[in-house]
Image (tube, helix red, strand yellow):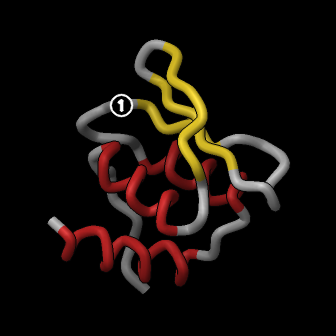
Amino acid sequence: MPRLIPLDWKILECIFLNDGFVFKRQEGSHRAYKKPTIMRRVIIPTYKSVGVDIILNNLRTAKMTRDRYFELLDICRHRG
C-alpha cells in the first residue's frame, strides 16, 4: 500500500466531498465538513501542504479506510 504524503487542501476537500461530506462553514483558514452518519466534523485547513498527521486524524474521524482514501485520491488527482 502506498504511504501517505502531505497534500494540497483542495485535493483533500475533493476526497471528503466524494465520500459524502458536505461543506458546512469556514473559520479563518479552517473549513468544516459534515456527513450525517459521522458524529464529528472533519476539519481541513486551507494549507498548500496539509500534513500527514492531520490527514490521519481526519481519516479516523471520518471512519475512512486507507484503501478508500487511496481510491478517492486517485479519482481526485485525475479530475484535475
The answer to which of 53 and 70 lies nearer the viewer is 70
Query: How far across and down, in percent of the image, does residue 6 sit?
Result: 32, 51
Which residue is at a point 34% across and 43% down the rendered structure image? 9
Q: Which residue is mark 1?
A: 46
User: Does residue 6 lie above or below 41 as drawn?
Assistant: below
**Front-lying residue, 26 or 48:** 26
**Among all residues in the image, which is located at the extreme left?**
80
Q: Does 34 sit left or right of 44 as displayed?
A: right
The residue positioned 40% from the left and 43% from the top of the image is: 51
Residue at point 54%, 79% (across, down): 68
For badge 1, the amino acid type reads Thr
Instruction: Specify whether 55 is left or right of 13.
Output: right
Say above or below: 4 vs 53. Answer: below
Residue at position x 38%, y 58% in the image:
14
- How many numbered marks appear? 1
Give 24 or 43, whichever is nearer the viewer. 24
Percent across and percent down for residue 74 are: 31, 78
Which picture quadrant has residue 1? Answer: bottom left
Residue 44 position (above or below residue 67): above
* Residue at the extreme top of the image, as rendered: 28
Q: Position of residue 25 (x, y in %)?
A: 56, 27
Q: Rate crowding at label 1 as few (under 14), some (14 to 19) or many (20 or more) other CA atoms within 10 Å.
A: some
Give the secondary structure at mark 1.
Answer: loop
x then y, percent, for residue 80:
15, 65
